[in-house]
Amino acid sequence: MTKRLLIADTTLRDGAQTVGAHFSPDAKLKVAEQLVRLGVDCIEIGTPVAAPGELETAARAGELLKDAPVLLAAFARAREGDIDLAFEGVGRHPHSMLNLLTSVSDIHIESKFKSDRGRMLEVFAKMVRYGAGRGFHKLLVYLEDGTRTDFSYLAELVSAFVEAGADIVSIPDTVGYVNSPRKYAEIFARLLAEVPAARRVLLSAHTHNDKGLAVANALAAIEAGAGMVECTVNGLGERAGNASLGALLLCLHGSPGGAFSASDYGVETGVCLKEYARTAVLVGELSGLGVNYNEPLVGSAVVTTTAGIHQDGMLKDRRTYLCYDPESFGVEAGHRLITFNVQSGLKGITKVLADLGIGVEKAVAERIYEQVILLAQQKTPSTEDIRAIAMDVIEDGEHIIELSICKAESGVLPSSAEVVLRRRDTGETLRGIGYGDGPFSAFMDVTCALLGLDAQILDYHDVVVGQGRDSQMQAFVRCAIAGVTYQGRGVSTDIVQAGCRAFMKCVNRHLQQKIGPTHAPISGPPAAKLPLSPAR
Ligand code: MN
């Protein structure tokens, strides 16, 4: 007898809290669309109260996914204002869901709320009732830090929350406290056995990987009767991350017909396994973190083997050293290069993009094509190259200012950068030279001077695309301009140019916000119009 297990994805909320991960609003929507294709049951899209962008993204997702058979969840603290904003975000989706945070361990109650168990139970139950009356299709309550909470109090909370209208109760191992899957399972087993209210709702597992047990704990909870499991693509998440969806799927669907299978857990999922690999790669690209080399299923190292004996075995029969079929998860274990040249044409690129699960309008496909052709003059573009370029172009938007030339010098101090910026609508150019302790800082120095901007880099990192010495680099830049945070990505075979392009995206986003796409002059000092001369 199999039971339908719900898969809840929190890549765009808990996963987005990973240090260094940045999902732009458009990136979130792209990921959400792919998660729908993957067939997860619930997408936690974000925290509308956290920022205006989060609210807008949730609302856009609600519209974009309105016909998708998926629960669209927004995260909220147990406050009326948070809940109202969550509803404003996802409320119009036919399957809207409120993911309500209650923090229940003594540590949280005493340190965060300076309160006691009895009073907090009342406050939380009141907010659950408020949420339940707000019009969401489903309501999940997180019992944050539930694994460090007295079982008797946990049982009281579950009864009160179910009474107040919760449909799903999640027991997060928020800080990765549990050191044994058996102990995590026991919480679920006891709730189901001893708390009648718990049997009227779904119990959900939410695990963190601080002790390397996120997936094991989640599986143990499933065995103990959890009806939903919360996880992230590539195991993204704060600190050591959340349970990896890929690893979970491998455990649940790993070897059909073999000794181990989903029937070990007596569950089935609605996931279309073949969509997993492209989901994981997309999340790697759009989060800015890439995919760990050893991430189950999709890491660069996991379907290759270097040990001689293993290679010999793999060549004779792959099953000797591989216990599952990578292709059934959409992983191409074979040669990843594709033949792409100038003759392939726009149709060719549209086909490649479609195969990668990237649907774009014709105008965007044309811009991607132009960039791929440029790269094809230097190397044979791989699917990874094309994907990286596509992600770069898709996020590009309407640029007001483009970088025509950046000639930067490295290896001498100070480094210098000659920059020519061009205003797209008028063709007007700005030129200058800047200096810094490296080519990127020199570029930033002159660009900011030319445009009269005050920018500060908050985060910068590079990720290589594919392998080989002719690989492209992707740079991810997060910066503050006039107190507002922007993020940008840039792709190039030249590491400095990739960073400069990423920074230009931030600049353009700032200018779009400041002056709108086409009007008004770009502020810049008068010296900007002079021929090449040191900016300062
Ligand atoms: Mn979490």
Image (cartoon, rainbow, N blue to C red):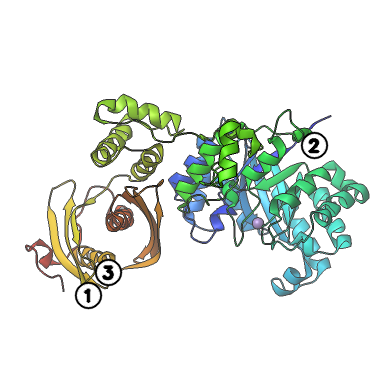
Write down the quadrant of residue 42 in the picture.
Answer: top right
Q: Which amino acid lies under the numbered mark 1 shown in the image of this protein?
A: Leu
For the point 43% across and 45% down, the residue is 26
Dot 1 falls on a residue whose secondary structure is loop
Labelled disc at residue 438: 3
Q: Are marks 3 and 1 in contact (CB under 8 Å)?
A: no
Q: Are marks 2 and 1 in contact (CB under 8 Å)?
A: no
Query: Which residue in the protein does label 1 denote?
Result: 413
Dot 3 falls on a residue whose secondary structure is loop
Q: Which amino acid lies under the numbered mark 2 shown in the image of this protein?
A: Asp
Q: CA distance from mark 3 to mark 2?
A: 56 Å
- Residue 279 point in image, percent of width and height: 53, 39
**Mark 3 closeness class: few <14, some 14–19, many ≥20 residues within 10 Å:** some
Labelled disc at residue 264: 2
Q: Earlier in the sequence, mark 2 or mark 1?
A: 2
Q: Which amino acid lies under the numbered mark 3 shown in the image of this protein?
A: Gly
Q: CA distance from mark 3 to mark 1?
A: 8 Å
Foreground of the two, 337 or 472 = 337
Dot 2 falls on a residue whose secondary structure is helix
Against 111, residue 277 (above or below) is: above
Q: Earlier in the sequence, mark 3 or mark 1?
A: 1
Q: Earlier in the sequence, mark 3 or mark 2?
A: 2
Disc 3 residue lies near ligand 1 with CB under 8 A: no
For the point 28% across and 68% down, the residue is 441
Quarter holding the N terminus is: top right
- Residue 22 point in image, percent of width and height: 47, 55
